[in-house]
Amino acid sequence: MTQRVFITGGASGLGRAIALRYAKEGAKVCIGDINPEQGMAVETELNNAGGEGHFVECDVRRLTDFEKVRDELIQKWGGVDIVINNAGVASAGSIEDTTIGDWEWILDINVLGVVRGCKTFTPVFKEQGQGTFVNIASMAGLMLAPLMNSYNVSKAGVIALSETLSQELRDSGIHVSCVCPAFFQTNLTSSMRSDIPGIQQNVNKLMKRSGITAADVADDIFRSVKDKDFWVLPHAKERRMWILKRHAPWAFDWLMHQESKRWLKKMAPRANA
């Protein structure tokens, strides 16, 4: 049976990589994004990759956009099998310097954007008797490094929502996967908000040094949906840190403090000179 997939933020970065991964399997892939030019280009890519691509304008800050996509996919494809809540933004800064406006901005997109996606498509999945949510969180929501307050909280919120829905919806035939990558090459810093001088460039350096690509993360997501895994943790070092945190929190606390000092020097060298 041909899979029907909807991906928010699907016109670039990880969203595009996931869309192409499913298109190679012959899936019907709808990408929602706020960038029509990029979205139409990716739609063509998906068709050329062997899938059926479809672009729709979708701003995850608007519930009505999700509802329009839902209605369109029911009419066009008879429903949807996988909803990937991928759209997200980044911010960095101390608790003193991050504005309330930036807090509201990131929580509206990163947390409520996922909430809106899950809220809109849960009734569809229940009526179908099956469906999968893939919620893109981050290792930031598990490791909680300094100077990333609002971003950490937003991704921890996605993790909490995903764990809750995994229990709440399981008996309705609905599977949930929660994806927590660390650094990999993507365009996340293009919309990043921060008052820390040079932080976008420092984050980009860390992304470029990563041995994990967006295509690698997309492969892990594809496998997790197929195998019905909840956790998707693509980075080995950070996965080990998370296991240490769960099983030896006192050891993790000491190690994380050492890592945090190095992180502060990388992220804000002038402030910590």
Image (cartoon, grey):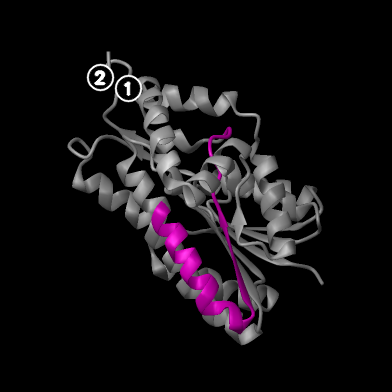
Q: Position of residue 212 (x, y in %)?
A: 65, 34
Give the residue furthest to the left: 96
The amino acid type of the residue labelled 2 equals Ala
Name the foreground residue: 37 vs 217: 217
Q: Is residue 13 above or below residue 67?
A: above
Q: Secondary structure at mark 2?
A: loop
Name the foreground residue: 56 vs 119: 119
Q: Residue at x 20, y 47 (%)?
A: 100
Q: Quadrant of the N terminus?
A: bottom right
Q: Position of residue 14 (x, y in %)?
A: 59, 44
Q: Is residue 190 above or below residue 77?
A: above
Q: CA distance from mark 1 to mark 2?
A: 5 Å
Q: Residue at x 81, y 56 (%)?
A: 25
Q: Position of residue 142 (x, y in %)?
A: 45, 48
Q: Is residue 30 above or below residue 79?
A: above
Q: Quadrant of residue 3?
A: bottom right
Reading the image, the residue beneath label 2 is: 271
Question: Can residue 104 be found in the magenta stretch?
Answer: no
* Residue 242 shows in the view: yes
Crowd rating for badge 2 (residues with CA inside 10 Å; few <14, some 14–19, many 20+): few
Q: Any mark on residue 268, and which?
A: 1
Q: Residue at x 53, y 51 (%)?
A: 9
